[in-house]
Amino acid sequence: MGGATTSSFVAPPSSLRNSSPDDCGRSHQHHHHLQPPSAVNSSARSTTATTTTTATTTTTTTTTAMASLVHALDCVFTPSPGACEEVLACVQRVLGEAGFRGSAQALGPGPGACGSLSGDGETCACLCVRESGLLTIDLHRDEAVSPSPDELFSALEVALRELRTEVQHLRRLPPVHRGGPVERFWALSDGRVVEYDFEEETLTTRSAYQSVRVLRSPQYGSTLVLNGDVNLAESDAAYTQCIMGDGQETFTGRDVLILGGGDGAILHSLLSNYKPRSITMLEIDPVVMEACRTHLRSVCGDVLDSLSGPTHQIVVGDCVPALRRYADSGTEFDFIINDLTAIPISTTHHHDSSWEFLWLILELSLKVLRPDGKYLTQGNGYNMRAALRVYEQHLGQLQPPVGFTRRTANVPSYLELWVFYTIWKKTP
Amino acid sequence: MGGATTSSFVAPPSSLRNSSPDDCGRSHQHHHHLQPPSAVNSSARSTTATTTTTATTTTTTTTTAMASLVHALDCVFTPSPGACEEVLACVQRVLGEAGFRGSAQALGPGPGACGSLSGDGETCACLCVRESGLLTIDLHRDEAVSPSPDELFSALEVALRELRTEVQHLRRLPPVHRGGPVERFWALSDGRVVEYDFEEETLTTRSAYQSVRVLRSPQYGSTLVLNGDVNLAESDAAYTQCIMGDGQETFTGRDVLILGGGDGAILHSLLSNYKPRSITMLEIDPVVMEACRTHLRSVCGDVLDSLSGPTHQIVVGDCVPALRRYADSGTEFDFIINDLTAIPISTTHHHDSSWEFLWLILELSLKVLRPDGKYLTQGNGYNMRAALRVYEQHLGQLQPPVGFTRRTANVPSYLELWVFYTIWKKTP
């Protein structure tokens, strides 16, 4: 960062102050929040999710001016009497010397404190010192008018290391853009934060079941986001490959049931690579299918253009009553591919409806699975070890007994490894 | 997030206030900053990089108490006279009603303002309102003692949408842990921020050339980090596969030169999968090799245990004079695998030493490449389009002319797609 920095934080040269936002956004370490021309819709004060949240008329310049860059410094120190006060005085002195004005206030009954100080170029330094031994400094600046804080942070680091208080570590965080036109920060399954490279919100709508969005990533292509979860992108053949058994299964001549699968990827792969005897896909949400038919065509091909073909049909509806009807009528399948919800994150599953739903789907599926059939499903993020363990323990306790294998895929748009399962009935 | 939230932000029940950090850290959406028992070394006030930055004696409880969770809310509003003041008054009113104390101050000569307000449970709300139309609120809290801000944020969202000022979008960011024991936030090639799942800093040292670290990820295994860049993890066979031509080349019976490759992955793959006539590896940094020999053994096998074998040798030294000696003596190779620096990020390459270095390596390599030989190299992140274009334009202008192909790999630990090249001399 900071290729166009000044030699002093306190007094940036006028050339920098006067530079246009476009000048400052040229470095390729900075994000380019280009406003795409094809944003669907704009309804600024809407409180419903049926309108897009991106504004159509924003230009690059306006966007850059609107966004703010936040640089952060963390300092962990050993708690001791007077440590908080010493750290706070040090930070206030260094910020004061750099021209920041303002003071801190008590954070609670103890010696902790917080404060926001304002500096040149409308820069704001927010500091928070905790008695437990943590100082955080967040420096909010407008890239267009205020200088890089590199030198200020260096001065702070030097000053903090000279204190009597023991500094355990000092760490600068990568700068973060705030207020850009497209949502870019997402949480992974284990709560970690990642910034996506989404440049455009192509679709934002709400179905009877969920919020349905398509965002455009330069790397991953059009990306389906359901209820805030990145679901599948055009880059994600690895997901489809892995949920279908990672090339270990042949579906030719078999009866295949897909639960969910509204993006059309599994159906498209089955029809392109195999000759199944029959494929039935049970998808509840026509809005998802329409979104993918329109925006993720490289994923679904033309399989979502109609609800049936010579050997396949798409049933728009709830899979639970359908599975019950199959069980009642004795209809059976060689493969059931469960592309519904991932394994719930909660591990206290006694009264968790998503675990109950998962077990119900599994129970009904095993009822309509042929004795030599296979049940293929996604699990969850590799790091959701406790939830995956709950799932595997449940599998180990099923009667009649089942066997299972587990595999991991590196799905490009997921930014974390993802676990999949193949489950079958053990022969007595 | 917030599975254990209270029904009111203002007055958390005493049971929550008194709960131990361990209780609050149990949700599997939270990070567990477990302090590994095997941290190498601890020298808290050290200013050199030769000692580890993790503390060995910190327990889980202390760690949780030390860390802070930051919840952020961004509000982009349409700039207009009085908008800033209206937004600020609204935020201060809602925060005041929730028991926050403190006030904001001017951010500069305009109506922009910043402030830090303190609330119950040592919670700190930092706000920054800019005339250009951006409000950011960062709520810093100690998970162990202060409640989730979900209700406060909802109240703020409702209040902001009721203003005369037009709110373009409101966006909550995923909560971020600050001050944990292991560095987790990294910038990708295009500046985006990602949080890794590193749980342990296994090695931190500094060689004559660079900082050398090994961090432990549950997903990716031991991960080599050079000068702050994630270089190669145990999960990253895809990198080695792709830089070696993605299975399209056979090295059996050929003379192979590796430039860099200190992690040993390429050498190990060549010796395991092919029978090259000769392999020469030119690696400048013995500290990198020793780090990988010790901590990334699944990557290098035993190939770094000695500097030579029946058909290979590792030359510890600078590759530039070695390449010049090969050119002078007429030594030639069938394959040159450049596993040195990635393509520089800067696109103003007239006086950029890293571009100069890249062109020098390429020029010298082409001199010692047999007429039907191939030069294999990494490029950079897929999103570094301008830098990749500079590289490809340079290739297009070389005399004698070269041809090239380009491919992309999804290297697990990189969290972004990575571009690789194969380059060859065009026959006249």
Image: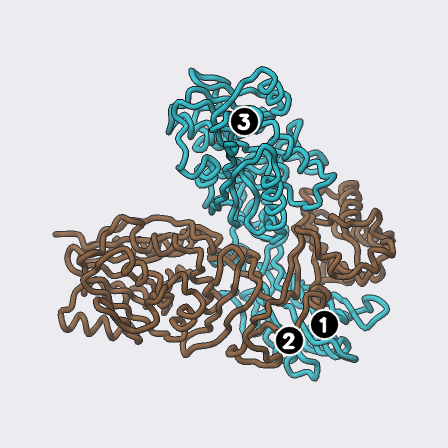
Chain colours: A cyan, B brown
Q: Earlier in the sequence, mark 2 or mark 1?
A: 1
Question: In what element is the residue under mark 3?
Answer: helix
The residue marked by circle 2 belongs to what chain?
A
Q: Eyeballing the image, is A222 above or below A317?
A: below
Question: How far apart, in angstroms, are the residues tagged by discs 2 and 1?
Answer: 9 Å
Q: Nearer the viewer, residue A218 or B149?
A: B149
Residue at 70% over, 76% down: A78
The residue marked by circle 1 belongs to what chain?
A
Question: In what element is the residue under mark 2?
Answer: strand
**Disc 2 and disc 1 in contact, CB within 8 angstroms:** yes
Which residue occupies the extreme front position in the image? A428
Question: In what element is the residue under mark 1?
Answer: loop
Do discs 2 and 1 share a chain? yes
Q: Is residue B230 left or right of residue B31?
A: left
The residue marked by circle 3 belongs to what chain?
A
Q: Nearer the viewer, residue A109 or A355?
A: A355
Name the residue carrying label 1: A133
Question: How far apart, in angstroms, are the residues tagged by discs 1 and 3?
Answer: 51 Å
Name the residue carrying label 2: A168
Q: Nearer the viewer, residue A95 or B173?
A: B173
Do discs 3 and 2 share a chain? yes
Question: How far apart, in angstroms, are the residues tagged by discs 3 and 2?
Answer: 53 Å
Residue B359: quadrant of the picture: bottom left
Name the residue carrying label 3: A289
How many other residues sit within 10 Å of disc 1, few (<14), some (14-19) or many (≥20)?
A: many
**Disc 1 and disc 3 in contact, CB within 8 angstroms:** no
Do discs 1 and 3 share a chain? yes
